[in-house]
Amino acid sequence: MALRNVVLPNEDPRQLLAIPKQEAKLYMSFMYVAFISLFIGGLMGLLQVLVRSGSFTLPFGIGYYQILTVHGVILALVLTTFFIIGFQFTLMSKTVGMSVKQRKVSWLAFWIMTIGTLVTAVTILLGKASVLYTFYAPLKAHPAFYIGLALVIVGTWVAAFVNWRQLYLWKKGHPGEKSPLLAFMVTINMIMWFIASLGVAAAVLVQFIPWSLGYAETINVLVSRTLFWYFGHPLVYFWLLPAYMAWYAIIPKIIGGKLFSDSLARLSFVLFLFFSIPVGFHHQLTEPGIDPTWKFIQVVLTFMVIIPSLMTAFSLFATFEITGRRKGYGGLFGWFKHLPWKDVRFFAPFVGMLAFIPGGAGGIINASHQVNTLVHNTIWVTGHFHLTVATTVILTFFGITYWLIPHLTGRKLTKSVNRLGIFQTIVWGVGMLIMSGAMHIQGLLGGPRRSAYSDYGGTEQAVSWGAYQMAQAIGGTILFVGIILMVYIFIKLTFFSPKGVEEFPVAEEEENAEPTPKWMENWKLWIAITIALILFAYTIPFVDIIQNSPPGSVPFDW
Ligand code: HAS
Ligand code: CU
């Protein structure tokens, strides 16, 4: 059994210290919302693939777009955000600490986010907001939908301020020291999130809420979509970066190795801050009304944001190989064979990494201006993001769950849960391979996304999708089994596993590593460059969009 919870001689005993009970309660609250969301959102996913297979109709007058909206909002926005904010709080607590006052403010963040979530979720469930998670105008939802979403965002801002204050106070108490890597990473992610969410907040407050309340008759569709994607692309990195935190700074510890390079990890996060935001046009490449030159410029910037992911891939391979060779496993692939395959804390994120190879390649295809015309608005894109967010990111989050939840609840990850976790990961991998693979192929055959089942009058092209839609239903059903298993594991780890101490694994740096340069923490410079890049990529096209927009659009009500 590769699980190692014993203290090794040079091990930092802080990693075994439990997080104070009152703090643990806060962090677990975020996790409860995340896992309830997983269950509800997953169930909706199951219904969707069944409808799209053509062999199932929703009962009780429930609409396809209603469940599709629940699925997208609850999984892509609620599950991710609650897991991330909760996880990041634990990282901050472990590395720089949390004061009682900060804890109280964090509860405020939690409640604002939770109330916002409830308001939004109820509005969708009542069928008053079947506008999908991107809520494209001119689709119009009930005002409560937008107000709830705005609350969720405001809650995350409160969390961001707490995180920044945590690091600030730590730095004041440790003059001249470099900040702990994980705290640095959390701070970057929250700066990126804050700057990005200003865009969607502006759209919601200035455009959507007045419009849905009836104060404005029309809405400028292109402005709203542009503001959404200004936020929507960094949103996907807001999901990815916490997974990268685990890959860089936690996985090496789990496999018995060390962090490959502190500077490289920090540099890749700084690059994400720079290039995550000025790239939103790659979601609008087919949108009329945006100058192609600016689309091209943002595509170039998109290719820049691939670099830190390639740096991450390189760094992980290096960690894996160095660790294996140090343990004495020679040969070309000896190190690979001896990775701790039976430890779910490694295995689940590893399958996530594997999925990111085709997932990332698909992203590069999407971002290529010309090829995008082939795949845009097809279910290929749905395949892409089920590999990235619903495999790479979520399997890493599951991998974190196996040690984080017992660490917070004072329990042990037992051998049987570990084994079940390995099985869960395989179920997820197989289900996703079938579902996402079929989505990619059907997309290339022209199958649309964001649409319920139709045989399009029996056209030849629609007939060619049949088998792939069936495959998606099979893959989706397997995935739902994976969700049931994961929710079971979560409940087990929270309430029923035997009491004990579970390690909070944080990797140390290599002893002979080059010291991290001081300029790495030049926050003002990083933020200035980020803003300069955003202004460069968005100012001229945005002015152009506002000046030359067609008249505002009237709502499209269901
Ligand atoms: Fe994307 C659409 C481009 C990454 C999520 N993306 C989406 C949507 C979502 C999403 C949700 O340019 C749909 C939005 C909607 O509803 O309309 N995406 C990219 C690019 C990347 C990328 C260039 N996407 C992501 C990530 C996501 C995500 C990450 C979520 C977490 N995406 C697009 C474009 C569209 C798009 C267009 C619009 C399409 C359209 O027309 O609508 C890049 O960041 C990808 C870079 C990644 C790599 C991979 C590096 C590999 C690593 C793993 C190493 C593995 C190891 C394992 C070490 C280059 C790091 C060891 C293995 C052994 C074998 C030993
Ligand atoms: Cu994007």
Image (tube, rainbow, N blue to C red):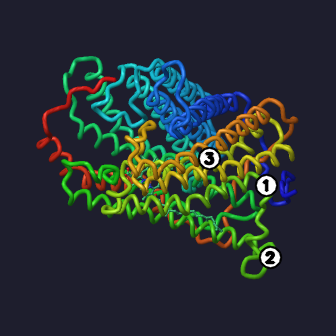
Q: Secondary structure at mark 3?
A: helix
Asked whether, in this view, residue 12 is left or right of residue 284, the answer is right
Which label sits in the foreground, 3 or 1?
Answer: 3
Q: Name the residue that disc number 1 marks.
A: 343
Which quarter of the rendered picture does the N terminus lie within?
bottom right
Q: Name the residue that disc number 2 marks.
A: 329
Q: Amino acid at mark 3?
A: Gly
The correct choice, above or below, for 303 with respect to 527 in the image is: below
Q: Residues within 10 Å of mark 3 (few under 14, many from 20)?
A: many
N-term-proximal mark, 2 vs 3: 2
Query: Image quarter for residue 99?
Result: top right
Which label sits in the foreground, 2 or 3?
Answer: 3
Question: CB of mark 2 within 8 Å of CB of mark 3?
Answer: no
Image coordinates for residue 82, horizontal then vertical, percent: 56, 34
Q: Nearer the viewer, residue 220 or 164?
A: 220
* Rendered residue at 17%/32% (across/down): 552
| Mark 2 to mark 1 CA distance (whole Å) | 18 Å
| Mark 3 to mark 1 CA distance (whole Å) | 25 Å
Q: Amino acid at mark 2?
A: Tyr
Task: State the mark number for residue 475.
Answer: 3
